[in-house]
Image (tube, rainbow, N blue to C red):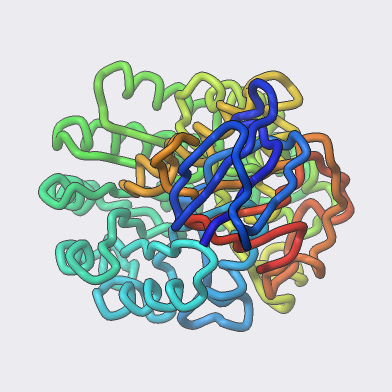
Amino acid sequence: MSTVIQGARPYGEGDPVDVLIEDGVITAIGTVEVPEDAEVIDAGGQVLLPGFVDLHTHLREPGREDTETIATGSAAAALGGYTAVFAMANTDPVADNAVVVDHVWRRGQEAGLVDVHPVGAVTVGLKGEKLAELGTMANSQARVTVFSDDGLCVADPLLMRRALEYSTALDVVIAQHAEEPRLTVGAQAHEGERAARLGYTGWPAAAEESIVARDCLLALHANARLHVCHVSTSGTADVLRWAKDRGTKVSAEVTPHHLLLTDERLATYDPVNKVNPPLRTESDAEKLRAALADGTIDCVATDHAPHAVQDKDTEWTAARPGMLGLQTALSIVTETMVRTGLLDWRGVARVMSERPAEIGNLAGQGRPIAVGEPANLTLVDPDAEWTVRGVELASIAANTPYEGMRLPGVVTATLLRGRTTARDGKIC
């Protein structure tokens, strides 16, 4: 099977070139002769990037297939330019054993649109009381490389220390949802003037920053790899910078919505804006963008969180936190990072493909666009714009905070090991 991408600009640099793909591998870059019966994709000078990797996706299967399935989430991912996603463990039943993670892995293989890598729970049932079967999951068919209780914090410092120590022998990473639960009881919004004016219980920045500081110290002493989920405050960026300067093996992600949106949106009381951690201030968003640009924050992760209408379209305090993100991530990064000059397209490849693949230990993803490399690729029209409509997205749910927004950057094709999975807004 052969594919030729004609007239693409790898990383948005230089003159357009042709890319020949044979049997899932890039075999030539330049001016190439089109093989007979090859699929031809006319790029027209568009930007060619390594396929995106999402370290933080909620696919809801098993347990909440009314909101998302591995198949529909995979479709959303492919349409968003992703070739690999990590499916979080807070399913029903919880992915805290080999049976569940292998089930998720197999369902991803059956869907065949992206590589679905299950994330294993750190603790049994996400209860924060007893370590889950980390070794069994790491050695299962799914080969779990990332463990997280996301949605809940591993708040017990002794349990977190044990998880980090155990992870070193397995060569896996522990991903922490940083939230000191004693500081967020009843919290509904970022603690500050706006929450007070709206009557919401405040969610202090220190609830996140204190756990990140604690865990960085634990990881340093254990010589373990720590990953911080959905960084939301400028103070957390400061802690990460301090920890990295000390040699801590810590990485971190930021969501697209924390790069763009702020707590100003809460004035409407629309629960589509409710997310965990909450939307912060414009000052926080500005510093997060700078931290992503300079590498203090390693990558972008969507925290794609679909919800049923009855769980989201209700009064604020009862609404579930979370937003869709897979199909809009590239556009938000384009808006906040590329158009502002904070990142070029090679930088986008770093934060959306290369670094997340490295953190998740995926050998075949996030690779350079070069001869001999796997053809996991994303073609982007940087000049095109589109209007977000939740009902038109591939997810079962429609809880997007970007409803009606006109956003830049359109994914026109996604290739998984040379096979086109999405093209011109449709699944192939």
Residue situated furthest top in the rendering: 245
Residue situated furthest left in the rendering: 169
| Residue at image coords 80%, 39% | 408
Q: Residue 357 at x, y = what percent?
A: 40, 44
Q: Nearer the viewer, residue 403 or 204?
A: 403
Q: Residue 393 at x, y = what percent?
A: 75, 65
Q: Quadrant of residue 270?
A: bottom right
Q: How many marks?
A: 0
Visible in this render: residue 164? yes
398 left or right of 342?
right
| Residue at image coords 63%, 62% | 37
Q: Nearer the viewer, residue 110 or 215?
A: 110
Q: Nearer the viewer, residue 151 or 70?
A: 70
Q: Nearer the viewer, residue 397 or 371?
A: 371
| Residue at image coords 18%, 47% | 171
> Measured along the vertical axis of the image, is residue 306 above or below residue 338?
below
Q: Residue 304 at x, y = what percent?
A: 59, 58
> Measured along the vertical axis of the image, is residue 22 above or below residue 280?
below
Q: Quadrant of residue 282?
A: top right
153 left or right of 222?
right
Visible in this render: residue 231? no
| Residue at image coords 56%, 27% | 347
Q: Quadrant of residue 146?
A: bottom left
Q: Residue 285 at x, y = what percent?
A: 65, 30
**Figure quadrant of the C terminus:** bottom right
> Measured along the vertical axis of the image, is residue 164 above or below residue 394?
above
